[in-house]
Image (cartoon, grey):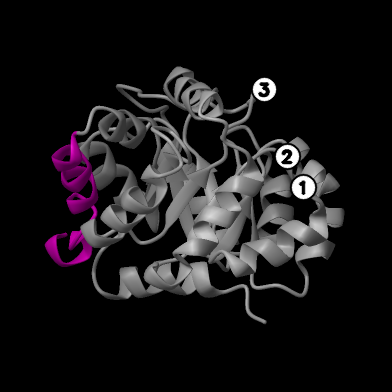
């Protein structure tokens, strides 16, 4: 077993002169039948990996755009089990890693061992659970121990040095560097000191560091991507897909390409 498939995809992207681009989508927004089309489109457009959000009625990290997408998906009858089954149905067509972002209650309801097995059956190689702190992650980590699924940790701007060190030591897949204080959503600017924060994270971590939260424009992708190993873009992608603006999605992904050769 290896938990390095997500890491390898990011490293390979960097070695080719680009920064990683990981779009977030809400599974079931527009109906379950849209999931395959959306994932294959993002793969063709050049995404490094895809973060597949699971709709949840009580999110703690999501802003208005993603909450509304979650409500639309829940209205379509989405569940984690339906989504895993759908992902498994076209697994062979997906050549980039999928990472699931969900909350702890759906995971516990599903069953830890069942989820670990179904992730592998569905082409899911990473799991993000934002309401599961490092100190409480042992049970889930144990369930994933004999799988290829990395348990990806988040680091906030307010994390003290000793906590960053502990998270970096336990990190799998990549470190999700939260770039704003608060919830997801479009921002016009980022806090001072972010560059130093990302530099310290990269120095402490043996896996790539991806910047996420608030990144919504090609300039953001280039700027934040230049400070990290890549970016995660959520609300801007969710909005563009909801509005059918596929060209906007391509423009955001293109901004991550050839950054190293152009610098």
Q: Are circles 2 and 1 on residues that touch, CB within 8 Å?
A: yes
For disc 1, the marked residue is 110
The answer to whether residue 95 is seen in the rendering is no
Q: Which mark is residue 58?
A: 3
Residue 49, relative to residue 145: is it above or below? above
Label 3: how many Cα within 10 Å (few below 14, some 14–19, many 20+)? few
Per the model, the C-alpha gap separating discs 1 and 3 is 17 Å
Query: What secondary structure is found at the residue carrying circle 2?
Result: helix
Residue 207, horizontal then vertical, whole percent = 55, 66
Per the model, the C-alpha gap separating discs 2 and 1 is 6 Å
Residue displayed at 46% across by 74% down: 8
Label 1: how many Cα within 10 Å (few below 14, some 14–19, many 20+)? some
Horizontally, residue 136 falls left or right of residue 161, namely right
Q: Which span of residues is magenta-colored?
A: 245-263
Query: What secondary structure is found at the residue carrying circle 1?
Result: helix
Residue displayed at 14% across by 41% down: 247
Query: What secondary structure is found at the residue carrying circle 3?
Result: loop
Residue displayed at 53% across by 23% down: 75
For disc 2, the marked residue is 106
Per the model, the C-alpha gap separating discs 3 and 2 is 11 Å
Horizontally, residue 224 falls left or right of residue 4, namely left
Residue 86, horizontal then vertical, whole percent = 52, 54
140 and 71: which is toward the camera: 71
Residue 15, horizontal then vertical, whole percent = 31, 75
């Amino acid at each position: 077993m290896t938990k390095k498939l997500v890491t390898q995809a990011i490293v390979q992207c960097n070695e080719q002169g680009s920064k990683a681009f990981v779009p977030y989508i809400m599974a079931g927004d527009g109906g379950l039948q849209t999931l395959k089309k959306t994932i294959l489109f993002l793969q063709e457009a050049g995404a490094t990996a895809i973060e597949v959000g699971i709709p949840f009625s009580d999110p703690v990290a999501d802003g208005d755009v993603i909450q509304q997408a979650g409500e639309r998906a829940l209205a379509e009858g989405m569940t984690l089990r339906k989504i895993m089954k759908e992902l498994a149905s076209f697994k062979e067509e997906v050549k980039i890693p999928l990472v699931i972002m969900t909350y702890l209650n759906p995971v516990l309801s599903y069953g830890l061992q069942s989820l670990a097995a179904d992730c592998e059956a569905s082409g899911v190689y990473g799991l993000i659970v934002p309401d599961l702190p490092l100190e409480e992650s042992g049970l889930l980590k144990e369930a994933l121990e004999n799988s290829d699924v990395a348990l990806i940790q988040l680091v906030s701007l307010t994390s003290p040095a000793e906590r960053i060190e502990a998270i970096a030591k336990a990190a799998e897949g990549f470190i999700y560097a939260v770039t704003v204080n608060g919830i997801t959503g479009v921002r016009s600017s980022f806090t001072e000191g972010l560059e130093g924060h990302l530099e310290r994270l990269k120095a402490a971590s043996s896996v790539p560091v991806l910047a996420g939260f608030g990144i919504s424009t090609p300039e953001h992708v280039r700027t934040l991507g230049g400070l990290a190993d890549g970016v995660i873009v959520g609300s801007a992608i969710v909005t563009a897909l909801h509005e059918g603006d596929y060209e906007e999605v391509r423009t955001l992904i293109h901004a991550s390409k050839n950054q190293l050769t152009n610098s």
